[in-house]
Amino acid sequence: MARPLAPSEPQRHTVSSRTHLDELGSPDPLELDRLRQENAQLRQLCVELEQALTEAVQHSPDQANGQSPISEYEALLDSKDDTIRQMHAELQEARRSLEQRQPAQTTASRAGSPPREDELLALSEELELERRQLAEDEQSLMEQMRQMEMIMARERAEMARQRVELQRLAGEVSHELERLQKAGGLQSKTDQLRAALLEVTTRRGAFRSGNNPTTQPEPGASPPPPRHRGSLLGMLFGGGK
């Protein structure tokens, strides 16, 4: 991970720059124009970084439980963004202070001695150091944003894979439930058929027992005379009585 920016460094450079600016007279117009151009570039950079950070946060997946690596990167980016905004505000304040004091300093410089070359050189080196620090901070922020985008892309791919797996499992569970419901319906139909068969069998047995009652002979009654076996044959063939 890139080295985080210490908030005290830009403040120290800004304070020292203000001290040099207060000690010096009117700055070189070319130097002032260069500072204004750098200030405009820094302002544009801050706007672009804020937009990129907002888009990255909006497209990041929601983390439901606990502190995730993405939230840690977001907190780090917020800290960097706050530091850049603070430095930008301090540069704007220094520029406004220079613009406000420019007429009076111009008059005083015309009446007095011009600033020394070594002081201007020290101020230029100080401003160059601040510019390099801002460039390093910009590079660090861009690297952290690239890392965060890679992490979010991997997490989105993992979530898509898990979604496909869950859909497959849901299909299997639905198929299994449907099969169990069909098996339960067949079992219920089988039970109904068995109950109907048992009822029909019971009714048939009761019907047979009602048509063929077992009669017992009354006591003292004589049994009926046996039928003559040959009577039917005699009637048919004319023989036997």
Image (tube, rainbow, N blue to C red):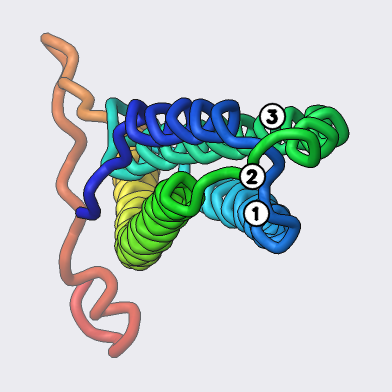
* Kind of residue at badge 2: Pro
Q: Residue at x 74, y 38 (%)?
A: 109
Q: Which residue is mark 2?
A: 114
The relative height of residue 108 versus residue 124 in the rendered view (above or below) is: above
Under circle 3, the secondary element is helix
Q: Residue at x 21, y 29 (%)?
A: 214
Q: Position of residue 24 (x, y in %)?
A: 58, 35
Compare residues 177 and 41 and report the one nearer the observer.
41
Count every numbered label the image shows and give the total. Answer: 3
Compare residues 173 and 225 and report the one nearer the observer.
173
Mark 2 or mark 1: whose residue is earlier in sequence:
1
The relative height of residue 214 versus residue 62 in the rendered view (above or below) is: above
The quadrant in which the N terminus is found is bottom left
Mark 3 or mark 1: whose residue is earlier in sequence:
1
* Kind of residue at badge 3: Glu
How busy is the neighbourhood of tag 3: few (under 14 within 10 Å), some, or many (20 plus)? Answer: few
Compare residues 67 and 226 and report the one nearer the observer.
67
> Is residue 16 found left or right of 52 in the rendered image?
left
| Spatial CA span between label 2 and label 1 | 20 Å
Q: Nearer the viewer, mark 3 or mark 2?
A: 2
Q: Which residue is mark 3?
A: 93
Q: Position of residue 235 (x, y in %)?
A: 33, 78
Mark 3 or mark 2: whose residue is earlier in sequence:
3
Q: Are marks 2 and 1 in contact (CB under 8 Å)?
A: no
Residue 45 visible (yes or no)? yes
| Spatial CA span between label 3 and label 1 | 13 Å
Name the outermost residue toward the bottom: 237
Residue 141 visible (yes or no)? no
Q: Which residue is mark 1?
A: 35
Q: Position of residue 80 (x, y in %)?
A: 43, 39
The relative height of residue 36 versus residue 219 in the rendered view (above or below) is: below
